[in-house]
Amino acid sequence: MSKKILIISASPRKNSNSEALARAFAEGAEAAGHEVDFVSLRGRTVNFCRGCFACQEKLRCVIHDDADTICQKALTADVLVFATPIYYYEMSGQLKTLLDRLNPLFPSDYAFRDVYLMTSAAEDEASVPERAVSGVEGWIECFERARLAGTVFMGGVTEAGENPEHPALDLARQMGQRA
């Protein structure tokens, strides 16, 4: 059964390693016959949440920027995939800001059940993405019908696209095929 998959790349760098993971996931998902919508936050306007909670009643944010459009896409997606570089052992500020702005999804009849996280960092210890994973898990806990379906970490990479043969790319592609 074909699924609607929304992939959100939160890297500010073009052709970044976390975006390469996201694109590998997309390749696998498309090969499996899924519909993929790829969104990069680079160059988009995503302002900070104001904490007004108007979205809880209106099911839309009162701030009309790119986050509002992305939120509407997330509402109807069966699968969400977040890709982020790891900065100071945590997800990028771009992704955290977007997660906060996805607050209108909380009271809605969202479609997503599976959430994936793709991360990359200069450091290569297995523990490097733990805080980012924990942050996304905290967000997922607010959505009782959703679960963290998988994570992929690409460690030991600094420059954008520096390792096109990294084994994490194959893992992301395989995960996309199984989504």
Image (cartoon, rainbow, N blue to C red):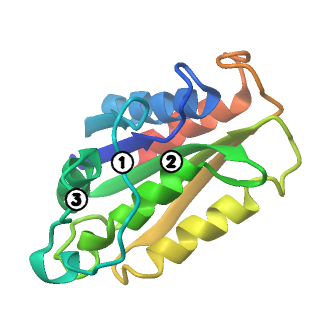
Question: Residue shown at 68%/35% (left/top)?
Answer: 168
| Element type where label 2 sits in the image | helix
Residue type (three-letter) at the residue carrying disc 3: Ile
| Cα separation between marks 3 and 2 | 16 Å
Q: Amino acid at mark 2?
A: Gln
Residue 167 at x, y percent in the picture: 72, 30
- The relative height of residue 93 versus residue 29 in the rendered view (above or below) is below
Q: Is residue 96 left or right of residue 145?
A: right
Kindly identify which numbered label has been placed on residue 94: 2
Q: Secondary structure at mark 3?
A: loop
Front-most of residues 153 and 42? 42
Q: Dot 3: within a 10 Å radius of its alpha carbon, few (fewer than 14), some, or many (20 or more) residues?
A: some
Residue located beneath label 3 in the image: 63
Residue 178 rendering spot, x and y as whole percentages: 43, 47
Indicate the position of residue 97 as horizontal and vertical percent values.
Answer: 46, 57
Q: Residue at x 64, y 62 (%)?
A: 133
Number of the front mark, 3 or 2:
3
Q: With 35 as the anchor, is 83 left or right in this view?
A: right
Numbered label tally: 3
113 up-or-down from 127: above or below: below
